[in-house]
C-alpha cells in the first residue's frame, strides 16, 4: 500500500514534523504540501532540509490526488478546511482543537468561537489511540488530541477507567517552546523564555482542561482538575507531574497491575519501573509516552509523572499513529 498524503499548513512545526515522518514511512508518500504565506517557495527555503517540495496554496490542492489529509492549522482556521476535505469524502486528521470536543457549546465555552460545522463534530473521533482505537479504525475524521491532554490522559487513564481515581487532581505540566508553534510571540522570544520558567493560563483557564474532562471525566464523577502549565526553555518535550488520590486499599503493586492491564503490549507506552520518574529524555524524538508511579507515605496518595515529545506523541507522531490505525497498517509504521 502507498497512501498519498496531503498536508495543509505544512510550514509550521507540526507540519514539518509530519513531513519528516512521512518521508520515512514505508507505506506513505507526500502528494502535496500547502502554505498560504509561502506558496511558490520550496520546503528547503524554510527549513534546513534538502527536501525541495514546492509549497502550494490550499486552493490549488487537489483532493483527488490524496487518500488522507493532515491539517496543521490554528484552531478556527481548521473548521472550514476540514469541511472542504470531508466534502469529497477524503479522510482527515486535524491537529487543531476544532474537532476534539464533541459538544459545540463546550467548544465555544473554551475557545470563545461558535463552531460552524456541528454536523462534522458529530462524526469526529477523538484520536487518543490507546483509548479510542476501535472507533478510529473506521473514522472519516479524527480530532488529534492536544499535547498536554495526551500526557495527562494517558498518565491517568488506567486509574480512571478502573474507577479508583478520586475526583480532585492536581496537574503541574511543563512544555518546551515549540508547543507554542512557529509564529512569533513575545513570550517565546529567546530572551523572554531562556533562563526562565513561566506559568501561564493557570487557575482553570487553559483550554486543554476540556480534553482532560472529556476523557477522565467520563469515568470520574465530579472530576476537578487543577492544571498549571509552564513554559520551559527547551525546544521540545512535555513533562506532567500529577498529584492524585486513589482508593486507600490499593498499594503500589495493585496500582502497577492496573497500568499493566490497561496498556498490555502498547507499543508507545513505556511504564517505568518502581522508583523511576519520567523525564523528557525518556521520550524526546520518539512517539512514546513514559509513565511512572511514586507512592507518597500517606495511604492512597501517589504522584504520577508522564512525559512525551509534544511534536510527536503530542501531535504529529500520534497523528500518523491514527493514520496507521485508520488504514489497517502496522501501528508503529514510520514511528519510533
Ligand atoms: N506545536 C505543538 O506542539 C502542537 C501540539 C499539538 C497540537 N498543536 C496544534 O496543531 C496546530 C498547528 O500547530 P503548529 O505548532 O504547527 O503551528 P505553527 O507552527 O504556528 O504553524 C501553523 C501553520 O498554519 C498556517 N496558518 C496560520 N494561520 C493560518 C490561517 N489563518 N489560515 C490558513 N493557514 C494558516 C501557517 O502556514 P502559512 O502561513 O505558511 O500558510 C503554518 O503552516 C495548531 O492548531 C496547534 O494548536 C500543536
Image (spheres, helix red, strand yellow):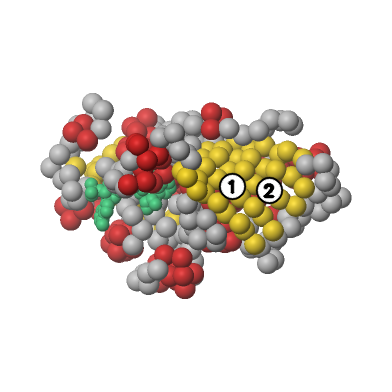
Answer with the quarter of the image where residue 161 lies. Answer: bottom right
Q: Is residue 251 above or below residue 138?
A: above
User: How many numbered dots are placed on residues in this image?
Assistant: 2
Tag 1 residue = 172
Foreground residue among 247 and 135: 247
Q: Secondary structure at mark 2?
A: strand
- Residue under pointer 2: 243
- Would you say 23 lies left or right of 246 here? left
Secondary structure under the numbered disc 1 in the rendered image: strand
The quadrant where residue 279 appears: top right
Q: Which mark is residue 332?
A: none
Q: Is residue 150 above or below residue 75?
A: above
User: What x and y, as percent, mark residue 139?
Assistant: 46, 57
- In depth, the one of 223 and 41 nearer the eye is 223
Q: Residue furthest left?
A: 40
Left-right relation of 306 to 77: right
Relative placement, left or right, of 307 versus 68 is right
> Nearer the N terminus, badge 1 or badge 2?
1
Seen from the viewer's position, the closer of residues 135 and 209 is: 209
Q: Position of residue 328 (x, y in %)?
A: 48, 44
Query: At which x and y percent is residue 129?
Result: 54, 48
Amino acid at each position: 500500500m502507498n497512501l498519498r498524503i496531503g498536508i495543509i499548513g505544512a510550514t509550521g512545526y507540526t507540519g514539518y514534523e509530519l513531513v519528516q515522518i512521512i518521508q520515512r514511512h514505508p507505506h506513505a508518500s507526500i502528494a502535496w504540501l500547502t502554505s498560504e504565506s509561502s506558496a511558490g517557495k520550496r520546503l528547503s527555503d524554510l527549513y534546513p532540509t534538502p527536501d525541495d517540495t514546492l509549497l502550494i496554496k490550499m486552493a490549488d490542492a487537489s483532493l483527488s490526488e490524496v487518500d488522507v489529509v493532515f491539517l496543521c492549522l490554528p484552531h478556527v482556521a481548521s473548521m472550514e478546511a476540514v469541511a472542504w476535505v470531508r466534502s469529497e469524502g477524503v479522510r482527515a486528521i486535524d491537529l487543531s482543537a476544532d474537532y476534539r470536543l464533541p459538544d459545540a457549546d463546550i467548544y465555544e465555552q473554551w475557545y470563545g468561537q461558535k463552531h460552524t460545522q456541528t454536523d462534522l463534530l458529530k462524526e469526529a473521533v477523538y484520536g487518543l489511540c490507546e483509548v479510542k482505537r476501535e472507533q478510529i479504525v473506521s473514522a472519516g475524521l479524527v480530532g488529534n488530541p492536544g499535547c498536554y491532554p495526551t500526557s495527562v490522559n494517558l498518565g491517568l487513564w488506567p486509574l480512571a477507567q478502573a474507577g479508583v481515581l478520586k475526583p480532585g487532581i492536581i496537574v503541574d505540566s511543563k512544555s518546551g517552546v515549540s508547543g507554542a508553534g512557529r509564529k512569533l510571540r513575545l513570550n517565546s522570544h529567546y530572551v523572554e523564555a531562556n533562563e526562565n520558567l513561566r506559568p501561564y493560563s493557570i487557575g482553570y483557564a487553559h483550554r486543554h482542561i476540556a480534553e482532560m474532562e472529556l476523557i477522565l471525566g467520563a469515568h470520574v464523577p465530579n472530576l476537578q482538575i487543577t492544571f498549571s502549565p509552564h513554559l520551559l526553555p527547551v525546544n521540545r518535550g512535555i513533562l506532567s507531574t500529577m498529584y492524585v488520590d486513589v482508593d486507600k486499599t490499593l498499594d503500589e503493586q495493585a496500582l502497577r497491575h492496573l497500568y499493566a492491564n490497561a496498556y498490555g503490549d502498547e507499543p508507545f507506552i513505556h511504564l517505568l519501573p518502581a522508583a523511576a520518574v519520567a523525564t523528557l529524555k525518556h521520550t524526546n524524538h520518539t512517539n512514546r509516552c513514559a509513565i511512572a508511579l511514586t507512592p507518597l507515605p500517606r495511604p492512597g496518595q501517589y504522584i504520577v509523572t508522564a512525559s512525551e515529545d509534544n511534536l510527536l506523541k503530542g501531535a504529529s507522531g500520534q497523528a500518523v499513529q491514527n493514520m496507521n490505525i485508520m488504514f489497517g497498517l502496522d501501528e508503529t509504521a514510520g514511528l519510533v
